[in-house]
Amino acid sequence: MLKSKRLSPVIIIGMHRSGTSLITRLLEKLGLFVGRRKDPNHESIFFLRLNNWMLRQSGGSWDHPKPIHYLMEDRKTRSLVKDYLMFQLKTQKVVSYLGLAGYFKNRSIYNISIPWGWKDPRNTFTLPIWLDLFREAKVIHIYRHGVDIAQSLKIRQDWRLSYGKQRFKRYKLFYTFRPKYGGFSDSIRCSTLEGGFSLWEEYMAEAERHICKLSSQAMSVKYEDFLTDPENFLVKLALFCNLKYSRTAIINLAKTVKKSRAYAYRSESDLQVFAECLTERLATYGY
């Protein structure tokens, strides 16, 4: 009996709030396996934890990712990280990604024989190490207007800060006996539009470096263009990911895409003013 051909993964990168969740969900419905256990943002918990672990090794985080460059440039540490990841991909922990049935069938992520991959914005900075492990991996970069990103991050940060404040008041006496381990919010940096926008610039610069090096091994998708013509882009993405699809499935999925989400900042005058102050910085990335 012939063994099924092992397939390299599709690694989805791009700044947080860029539409990566939307496009990943659509690709999953077309047949791309992106993990059994996922968080609300459709990120594989297995790979998310590994990415967070890598960022922490260099003192970084998703909203301060640049320190990971120290890890990438340190050969000895990078080699150890690579060995650790290879080991993790072969342990029982992969049940989180493969599911129980998938684990008994494959035992290791290296044995997957269907189109597969994972989405995590942190991939944007951890990608070099993943490419050390999966040299033939395909990469999809999804990007969106920086002002829409900054506003979305600010809204999320404001909500989480408000929630953190409420929890602190509710459990204040409890902290007399046990220290508070977590913070009050997700990202202080993203509490301002400039903070979120500058973070978008870091992700965009990093992603573009990868895309230039990977050539035909990578594909870039502008979120606003995708919303304008989802049917055409879904076909291109399906072909890129080697997915077997039907025209009916593409058409039905395209109908679920809300085109009004493109350039949302234009509906708010204060955001328009903010964008006008960033003309040169936006132009660097085609906006």
Image (spheres, helix red, strand yellow):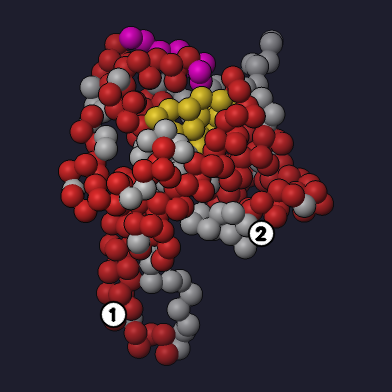
Taking the magenta stretch, the answer to whether it contains residue 169 is no
Q: Is residue 116 above or below residue 153?
A: above
Taking the magenta stretch, the answer to whether it contains residue 246 is yes
- Few, some or many residues within 10 Å of mark 1 (<14, 14–19, 20+): few
Q: Is residue 152 visible?
A: no
- Whole-number angstrom distance, CA of label 1 to CA of label 2: 34 Å
Closer mark to the observer between disc 1 and disc 2:
2
Report the amino acid beneath label 2. Gln
Magenta residues span: 240-247
The residue at the point 29 percent across, 27 percent down is 227
Task: Please state which of residues 230 and 105 is positioned toward the viewer in this rendering.
Answer: 230
The residue at the point 28 percent across, 15 percent down is 251
Tag on residue 170?
1
Tag 2 secondary structure: helix
In the rendered image, residue 193, in percent from the top left (x then y), is placed at: 34, 57
Q: Earlier in the sequence, mark 1 or mark 2?
A: 2
Residue denoted by label 2: 57
Would residue 118 appear left or right of 258 to someone viewing this image? right
Task: Please state which of residues 278 and 123 is positioned toward the viewer in this rendering.
Answer: 278
In the rendered image, residue 250, in percent from the top left (x then y), is placed at: 32, 16
- Few, some or many residues within 10 Å of mark 2 (<14, 14–19, 20+): some
Dominant SS of magenta comes to loop
Tag 1 secondary structure: helix
